[in-house]
Amino acid sequence: MTSSQTVASGSYWHATATMPVPDDPLPSEADVVVVGGGLLGCWTAYWLARAGVAVTLVERTGIGWGATGRNGGFVGSGTAVGYRDAIDRYGHETARELWRLTLEGQALVKRVLDEEEIACDHRAPGILSLALTEADLDDMGRDIAAMHADGFVGDIVDRATTQGAIATPLGPEIVGAAWFSRDGGQLHSMRYLAGLAAAARRHGARLCHAGVTALVTAGDGTRVETTAGPIRAGRVVVAINAWSDEIVPALAGVVVPVRGQILAYEPIPPVFTTGLAASITPSGEYWQQTPDGSIVIGGCRADAANGDLGVRDLEPTPDVIASIEGVLPRLFPELGGLQVAQRWAGPMAFTSDYLPVADAAPDLPGVWVTGGFCGHGMPYGPRVGQLLAEAAVTGTTPVALEPLRIGRPTLVPLAIAH
């Protein structure tokens, strides 16, 4: 995988790193074929290659072209909903296990970055969630108390302590904050994924440039039809997120594309040393300042028609971008003169219950599928990829993936307005 070709997207991550395009020859067969060169595809291929499995990853555009190369660069913890909400939705034990799984993912990111010497500006100062009303702060406190009761780390901080963590005056709305992800990290998403893909290849994975058009059960394996020819695979892992239903029709309406919109400001002197989040809109906002001084900020999806649910279009829209541009000046009055450097959109995927899918594909023996991480794929990726690699080797879905099964009672198809 040595091609230096890049594919334009407008993303800060793509603009400041090379998006590798796989260029290994397509083999006629493989023990396992992984479809998709995003976060879950690269992690799954990495673990398989480390285990000595003959694995071929097939990507139709470039490594990190989709959600991972267009995200906010956060490695948080927990589910897409708060801890008490997770307990109510999924049950206490399941919520606790999911939290542990994402914390294991955080630890694996750091471990593998160190082992593979992947330079991607990773740091783990935590992620600070700002409270904009006393009611918000009280609600955060109840979540932190529930986390403490189950042995998880978190803290509530007052306005003065919050100000001490931010090098620009707070606006009057900010009353305090919470550390829900005390060891949460930030990184350069494209360098991270490019480094992980390169590590997988060093361990023996093939990375090939082709689009997958169909999966056909063939004897005791699967014929993977691609634009570059067929591959016979013992087993297959499909990790294409917002495009899952293109080759696993059973996921239509279950794993649904959602457009996320983000921008990057021109570099300024250091202001933010942690990841930050707030809820100016119901869908939430998030930002980080990168080591070069740029500020990457996204969110405000609630201001889009139908929350951009069902949208794969990768063009940002003026209404959502205008809302994002209003976030920092509203919260920090001295940040009113920031200059936008890039604006872009990314193809996330959501489910009805805000949990991802990672399970055997219905009606496709020997195929596993994953997607629908609801904007929180970064902490899930390492561990879910590891468990999918185990499934592809053993032919059995690990018990740890039980909460992410397709047949769970909380998962129903989403109705998409057109």
Image: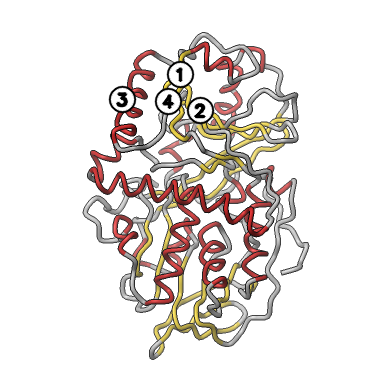
Give the crowd class for mark 1: few <14, some 14-19, many >=20 residues within 10 Å. Answer: some
Q: Looking at the image, is mark 2 or mark 1 nearer the viewer?
A: 1
In the rendered view, does 296 fall on the left or right side of 320?
Answer: right
- The residue beneath circle 4 is 155
Q: Looking at the image, is mark 4 or mark 3 nearer the viewer?
A: 4
Residue nearest the viewer, comparing 90 with 252: 90
- The residue beneath circle 3 is 142
Q: Which mark is residue 327?
A: none
Q: Counting residues from the N terminus, which is met first, the one under dot 4 or under dot 3?
A: 3
Q: Secondary structure at mark 2?
A: strand
Measured from the top left, where is residue 63 in percent x and y?
Answer: 64, 61
In the rendered view, does 238 fall on the left or right side of 328?
Answer: left
Q: Which mark is residue 128?
A: 2
Q: Counting residues from the N terminus, which is met first, the one under dot 2 or under dot 1?
A: 2
Compute the Cα span from label 4 to label 3: 11 Å
Q: Quadrant of residue 43?
A: bottom right
Residue nearest the viewer, comparing 215 with 361: 361
Compute the Cα span from label 4 to label 2: 10 Å
In the rendered view, does 381 fall on the left or right side of 20?
Answer: left
Q: Counting residues from the N terminus, which is met first, the one under dot 4 or under dot 2?
A: 2
Compute the Cα span from label 2 to label 1: 10 Å
Q: Looking at the image, is mark 4 or mark 2 nearer the viewer?
A: 4
